[in-house]
Image (tube, helix red, strand yellow):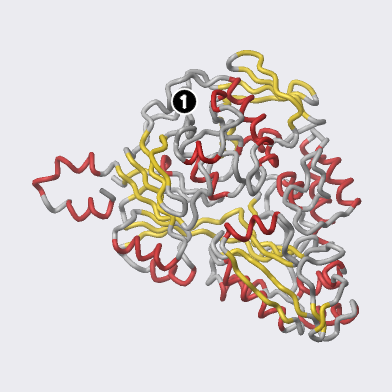
Amino acid sequence: MNTKTLRGAVAALAIVAALPAAAEDLVIGLRAGPDSIDPHWSTLGSQAEALRHIYDTLVDVDEKLQLKPGLAVSWEPIDDTTWEFKLREGVKFHDGTDFTAEDVKFSIERIPEVTGPMSMTLYTKYVDSVEVVDDYTLRINTKGIAPALPNDFTRLFVVPSETGMEAGNEEFNSGEKAIGTGPFTFVSWQPKGDLVLEKFDGWWGGDVAWDKVTRKEIPDDAARVASLRSGEVDLINYVPASDYLAMKNDSDLETFVSDSVYILNVQPSVAEVLPQKVKVNGEEIDENPLADVRVRKALDLAINRDVLVNVVLEGLGTPANQLMPEGFFGYTDKIGAKEYDIEQAKELLAEAGYPDGFEIDFTCTNNRVPGDSVVCEALAQMWSRLGLTVNAQALNGTVFFPAAARKEYSMAMSAWGTLTGEAAYTYGAMIRTADAEKGFGNFNRTLYSNPEFDKVFDEGTQTLDAEKRRALYEEASFIAMEDRALIPTVILQSVWAADAGTLNFTPRVDQETRAYAITPAE
């Protein structure tokens, strides 16, 4: 029974005694769910959000992304290339077996062996080797100095060592290998449908309020809103901007608003040969206009971020001037607010040899975060004022991300969040020249490469002194943004909604909806 059904039953005095038990089921309507039950399959936020109900991470973060203990209770560097983690004792997996350092070692070593759409090696790139000291002590030998290793391990989901390297999607999706130490056990999952979970009474984190949680994937915004209003679900995420004011002013509903870490970034490919050819005067050309920084600056100057925020997103966002929100480790104050100047943009385009513009394909997500598809269309219209013909197409993430990984788009846009709170995570993944051996550039879809940036950034990754590292990351941020390696547009805000007075819910900047952190209202 969901919370709305419960409220309707309050008037029936004959069943008051049964209400506490009924209140222990929670149904959540979500825009996106997992693509697999294997926690090492993908880096997508919707994947991590869902699976952390089943599996725990070595290090956790609070709602503001501050580090806190997870399966590790403490961590410290014992020399320049070694971190020691002390593990939580007395933790049980769902099958009753004990959690030990061997399980963490196995999980770290398994990640490179999993071939998913978005490699999790982003989080283990600094690991050289793993040493089990005893059941509850682990030492990580790193490839050089790795000051951000604990931040990376906020996405290190731990599975039992008995899982076996051969275990694949089929075994996890059926539930056979879906065994973690998390607050809920796996019951069932339908791709693009319901993930059903039951409370794990042996969770080390304590009791949770819900006996059963159903996470319903409802990608259509209108359908998700209708599901809340009809009582099908108790809580929804990603309330669309078009519905926000009406829901905010509805006394029967309660909305929860939070800033987020997610920024919609335009990704202009600088490849010598574009995967989708550009046309000038109706004829395909071999050269890539986006390889010219003047063209990238023109695209940037033609974006009216105030319109994107106040009109397109109806106020649910803020203009972005770099790849992280202000206050994050590596954010630089040397970059001011982004300027909107269509005339200067036209001049730059003409200087680059395209006075009459060109025709280009522009591909975005349409179900990743709130407003991605409408911002996509709005950008295409803004760029049309430059004389460009922009063929905007918004695709489901299940189509978009694999193709983006294959570098099939000439210009794309999707959201990225700095989930570790510091620059190495974002700039190392998206801007740094791709280097498989060092684990950099995993998500560099544009083939951007700048030796000046790489030198400064790499020095930062090898600097233990926090203030010196911060200064280097700020310099790297400035270089990348001046070069328009990527073009940030808006920082998104997130909105959840529930029946008024039914739930205690604290929104998170990473946009996660954690059922075990939600309780019924008194």
Residue 463 in the figure: left or right of residue 303: right
Q: Quadrant of residue 462?
A: top right
Residue 250 screen position, x and y as percent? 34, 67
Residue pictured at 53% horizontal, 72% vertical: 314
Image: 469 above or below 91:
below
Mark 1 element type: loop
Identified by mark 1, the residue type is Phe
Residue 451 in the figure: left or right of residue 30: right
Residue 362 screen position, x and y as percent? 69, 71
Residue pictured at 61% horizontal, 56% vertical: 262
Image: 12 above or below 220:
above
The residue under label 1 is 93
Image: 327 above or below 148:
below
Q: How many dots with numbers?
A: 1
Residue 308 appears in the figure: yes
**Disc 1 residue crowd, few under 14, some 14–19, many 20+, Cα 10 Å:** many
Q: Quadrant of residue 284?
A: bottom right
